């Protein structure tokens, strides 16, 4: 302890207060401390404001997919049904997954090049001149490097959540998107769930009054899947929960709340406080499995992320957001979506969603009338079709269709690289707060002040263009 204390003093951190304290608690070596200090202080000048940016129209959006796993095959299937899309490349380490996707798309007239086996085969696909968009559905550790490489090779990017694991990764995404003027959209599908979109429309029309507080979560019992030998390739997601601590998957609950509360577009996150329980589930499960199967002996005796993480965020405008994360407790699935305003409240989970503008919840008939009155035009236009095509009740398809329609018509996307960076940053920020006995941690401003003038997400513009369905 004395050597670390001496190092901190020599590094000139005495005046940094809590910042020095949390970094000292999180870093074990001088080099780690130096890197954390750099990440905490780093704020480069803005090269170009990507919020509201509309890229030149693409008559046909030519796509390459990296990662044909659990999420990847669904994304290929959805894009296969959208007009104005040409699937040019399919990439996965496993040739059988590439073949599965290829058999699907060749039946509808696509003739993609196939990339597999070589761990860096994706680079060959991303270097091609005849691809406009790279869709990334790999394990988390590959999200940032593939996105950076793609943008630097003149490609727009759709990347699964989270967009990056460290502040260094996230700043790199921001700077590269600004430099190349290529979209980096984190495909946060929950922003396109029908209830969330409807409440966004209600908020824009002033139904809730001044939005005061929001809540979101990802509470989903996944421990059986995490230990499955077949679900996650090379057990990659279990490895994430063994290696890291904090709110590791914040964006499903956080994204829709941020859009309603105009985060990055009129307000910004100020600081975060995060608390985690110990792990009471994953370690025990690993030991039980190891007693029956030698395969799991390498997972027994390791420490894992705690069951429940609760992170509380205060905004510059004096509002609050709560985000929770738990994938190992036995609880029904919930995203705890809640929007609380000065004149009303919306809450989803348990389903169906409900509303109140007094101290009593509205009855079923009133809720139905509100949902119809404020149904967004995009949902009205293709919502029923999206439900039939599928993907988490249709929100996945709605997201993909909307993204392609924006690219084909030269419209700004509903999510930009600043959203991707900010929403993903909750994971490392929560880890740092936990390591410092849950002291507050300053949230970086990835917009570098542009939040003051950036226009809010305008759901009235999501009317749907000329892109059809096959």
Image (spheres, grey):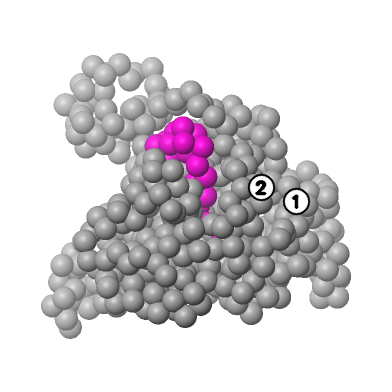
- How would you rate the neighbour count of disc 2 (Cα within 10 Å): few for under 14, some for 14-19, many for 20 or more? many
Q: Which residues are magenta?
A: 170-191
- What numbered label is drawn on residue 461? 1
- Residue 94 in view in this figure: yes
- Residue 329 in view in this figure: no
Evaluate if marks 2 and 1 touch, with contact meaning CB atoms under 8 Å apart: yes
Q: Quadrant of residue 448?
A: top right
Is residue 187 on the magenta stretch? Answer: yes
Residue at figure coordinates x 40%, y 26% from the top left: 41
Mark closer to the observer (2, 1): 2
Q: Nearer the viewer, residue 33 or 147?
A: 147
Residue at figure coordinates x 34%, y 60% from the top left: 139
Where's residue 346, x and y in %?
Answer: 73, 60
Q: Of the residues under marks 2 and 1, which one precedes in the sequence?
A: 2
Prevalent SS, magenta region: helix
Q: Quadrant of the C terminus?
A: bottom right
Indicate left or right for 98 with 163 as reference.
left
Where's residue 69, x and y in %?
Answer: 37, 70
Q: Quadrant of the N terminus?
A: top left
- What numbered label is drawn on residue 298? none
* 213 vs 308: above or below: above
User: Disc 2 designates what residue?
Assistant: 411
Where's residue 413, x and y in %?
Answer: 61, 48
């Amino acid at each position: 302890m004395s050597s670390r204390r001496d190092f901190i003093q020599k590094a000139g951190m005495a005046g940094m207060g809590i910042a020095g304290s949390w970094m000292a608690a999180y870093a074990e070596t001088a080099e780690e401390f130096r890197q954390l200090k750099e990440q905490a202080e780093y704020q480069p000048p803005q090269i170009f404001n990507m919020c509201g940016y509309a890229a030149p129209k693409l008559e046909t959006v030519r796509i390459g997919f990296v990662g044909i796993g659990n999420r990847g095959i669904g994304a290929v299937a959805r894009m296969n049904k959208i007009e104005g899309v040409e699937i040019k490349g399919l990439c996965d380490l496993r040739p059988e997954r590439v073949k599965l996707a290829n058999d699907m798309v060749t039946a509808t007239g696509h003739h993609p090049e196939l990339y597999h086996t070589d761990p860096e085969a994706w680079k060959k696909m991303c270097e091609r001149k005849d691809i406009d968009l790279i869709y990334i559905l790999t394990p988390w550790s590959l999200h940032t490097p593939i996105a950076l490489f793609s943008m630097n090779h003149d490609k727009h990017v759709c990347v699964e959540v989270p967009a990056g694991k460290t502040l260094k990764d996230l700043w790199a995404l921001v700077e590269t998107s600004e430099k190349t003027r290529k979209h980096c959209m984190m495909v946060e599908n929950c922003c396109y769930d029908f209830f969330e979109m409807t409440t966004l429309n209600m908020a824009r029309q002033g139904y809730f009054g001044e939005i005061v507080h929001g809540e979101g979560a990802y509470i989903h019992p996944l421990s059986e899947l995490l230990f499955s030998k077949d679900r996650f390739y090379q057990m990659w997601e279990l490895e994430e929960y063994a290696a890291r601590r904090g709110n590791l998957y914040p964006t499903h609950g956080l994204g829709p709340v941020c859009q309603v509360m105009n985060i990055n577009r009129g307000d910004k996150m100020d600081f975060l406080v995060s608390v985690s329980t110990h792990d009471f589930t994953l370690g025990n499960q690993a030991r039980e499995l190891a007693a029956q199967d030698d395969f799991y002996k390498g997972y027994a005796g390791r420490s894992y992320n705690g069951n429940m993480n609760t992170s509380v965020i205060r905004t510059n405008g004096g509002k609050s957001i709560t985000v929770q994360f738990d994938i190992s407790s036995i609880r029904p699935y919930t995203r705890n979506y809640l929007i609380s305003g000065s004149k009303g409240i919306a809450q989803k989970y348990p389903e169906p969603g409900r509303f109140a503008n007094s101290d009593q919840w509205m009855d079923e008939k009133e809720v139905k009338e509100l949902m119809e009155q404020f149904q967004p035009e995009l949902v009205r236009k293709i919502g029923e079709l999206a439900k039939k095509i599928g993907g988490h009740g249709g929100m996945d398809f709605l997201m993909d269709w909307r993204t392609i329609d924006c690219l084909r018509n030269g419209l700004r996307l509903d999510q930009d690289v600043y959203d991707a960076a900010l929403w993903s940053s909750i994971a490392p920020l929560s880890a740092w707060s936990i390591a410092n006995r849950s002291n507050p941690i300053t949230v970086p401003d990835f917009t570098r002040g542009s939040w003051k003038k950036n226009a809010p997400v305008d759901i009235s513009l999501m009317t749907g263009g000329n892109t059809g369905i096959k």
